[in-house]
Amino acid sequence: MAAIIELRGASKTFDDTPALHPTDLTFERSRTTALIGPSGCGKSTLLRLIVGLLSPSAGDVLFEGERLSDDNLLQIRRRMGYVIQDGGLFPHLSARQNVMLMPNHLHLDSAEMKQRLGELCELTHLPEDALERYPVELSGGQRQRVSLMRALMLKPDVLLLDEPLAALDPLVRTSLQTQLKEIFQRLRQTVIMVTHDMAEAAYLADTIVLLDSGRIVQSGSFQDLRERPAAPFVSEFISAQRALVQI
């Protein structure tokens, strides 16, 4: 299967300190990949290189074979949906206004966008009356649903999730994990997500990329990592997550 995103020797250094060592990595279409590892391992740096919030210190990031650059970054970024941990909603805008930011900016057809909004409410299980509320009036789970709707509004080719469920309580998190899996399966979209939770990665992702100290330690399915660890760190990381159930 052809890769939609590829890193070729991509690295990132901050003040002579490497956050990500030279990395080769491909992301296949219509598959979910989880980037996981301890704090400071480089997973969020890698995601921000993909979305173009950071530029690589060396190497390249390619989208459909085209190198990300200042000339094409805005065009390519519009083909990506991006959700951060706290949702990133503008507090002075209603949920509806947050979701409609880009469609309004691009002057897209209002009737089509209204239909799309209804489809996304159904997809994310958000009551339509919640669209009139401001972020402070929404629950944590509702804010993340609104953020996901905003990311999906323009039907992006790639969905990027940076620990989107980390701040939620366990019951809400479990419910959203189930709904996210249903959404991924329905849309058959390319998804790249950052998480620190191996059980979440195993439940949601086709491929898990485990990082440590800015390097990829192992990439594969959860079964690959659990049954055929490439290094002692892999087994240590899995064993350290005591809440991990047999999957």
Image (cartoon, grey):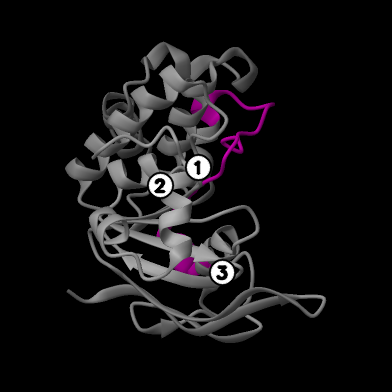
Sequence-earlier tag: 2 or 3: 3
Q: Is residue 20 magenta?
A: no
* 160 horizontally vs 137: left or right: left
Q: Quadrant of the N terminus?
A: bottom left
Q: Quadrant of the C terminus?
A: top left
Q: Amino acid at mark 2?
A: Leu
Front disc: 1 or 3: 3
Q: Find the distance from the CA under tag 2 to the CA under tag 3.
A: 28 Å
Q: Is residue 44 in view?
A: yes
The image shows residue 219 at horizontal and vertical percentages of 35, 67
Q: At 63% from the left edge and 76% from the top edge, which residue is drawn? A: 55
Q: How dense is the environment of label 1, judged by Cα within 10 Å: few (below 14), some, or many (20 and up)?
A: few
Q: At 28% from the left edge and 75% from the top edge, which residue is drawn? A: 3
Sequence-earlier tag: 1 or 3: 3
Q: Amino acid at mark 1?
A: Asn
In the image, the segment drawn in magenta is 74-97
The residue that disc 3 covers is: 49
Q: Is residue 35 in view?
A: no
Q: Amino acid at mark 3?
A: Leu
Q: How dense is the environment of label 3, judged by Cα within 10 Å: few (below 14), some, or many (20 and up)?
A: some
Closest to the observer, 157 or 173: 173
Q: Are marks 1 and 2 in contact (CB under 8 Å)?
A: yes
Q: Find the distance from the CA under tag 1 to the CA under tag 2.
A: 6 Å
Q: How many marks?
A: 3
The image shows residue 38 at horizontal and vertical percentages of 57, 53
Q: Is residue 86 magenta?
A: yes
Closest to the observer, 109 or 143: 143
233 to 187, vertically: above or below: below
The residue that disc 2 covers is: 108
The image shows residue 20 at horizontal and vertical percentages of 61, 73
Task: Report which quarter residue 16 is drawn in.
Answer: bottom right
